[in-house]
Amino acid sequence: MLAKEKLTKAARSGNGRVHVRTGDTVVVLSGKDRGKQGKVVAVSPKEAKLIVEGVNIVSKHVKPRKQGQEGGIIKTEGAMYASKVQLVCPHCGKRTRIAHKFMEDGTKKRSCKKCGDVL
Ligand SMILES: [Zn+2]
């Protein structure tokens, strides 16, 4: 069932990193779920894809595998390209990009480009 996925252009050009992390709140920029917000539940840097809670719901047809388990169609979140989402700052609530802030102790932290708060 798991067909080997062809590496897409986005994945090939990616440097194996995605601009958001698991747990971040993001807003969808395009597609049928445009404007929807959700939490990132999984990130696949290799494919430049991620899964967002409640976004890109796809129907999966499942067969009963164990006895007593029912088959049928289940709805689940599908992976989508990371480039289709933008981070929402938890402090100012705006769509934002990520800036990097250097702390006094020399560590680098992510911060909101709009309000400057550390994320
Ligand atoms: Zn902010």
Image (cartoon, rainbow, N blue to C red):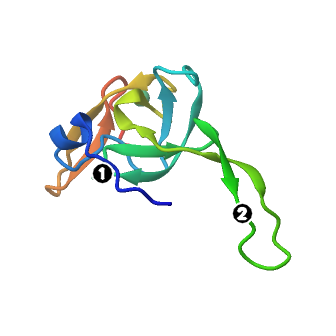
Q: Residues within 10 Å of mark 2 (few under 14, many from 20)?
A: few
Q: Which residue is mark 2?
A: 63
Measured in 3D between alpha carbons, the distance from the residue under mark 1 to the one under mark 2, in whole angstroms, is 30 Å
Q: How many marks?
A: 2
Position of 19 compared to 78: left or right? Answer: left
Q: Position of residue 13 (x, y in %)?
A: 16, 38
Residue 24 x/y as whole percent: 47, 44
The structure residue drawn at horizontal position 24% and vertical position 42%, both measured from the top left corner, is 11
The spot of residue 6 in percent (x, y) is 29, 46
Nearer to us in this view, 14 or 112: 14
Give ligand 1's quarter of the image: top left
Nearer-the-camera pick, 100 or 64:
64
Residue nearest the observer in this picture, 16 or 70: 70
Residue type at mark 2: give it: Lys
Question: With respect to residue 3, does 50 lie above or below?
Answer: above
Which residue bears the numbered disc 1?
45
x then y, percent, for residue 56: 58, 35
Disc 1 residue type (three-letter): Pro
Q: Residue at x 32, y 28 (%)?
A: 97
Q: Name the one closer to the observer, 87 or 114.
A: 87
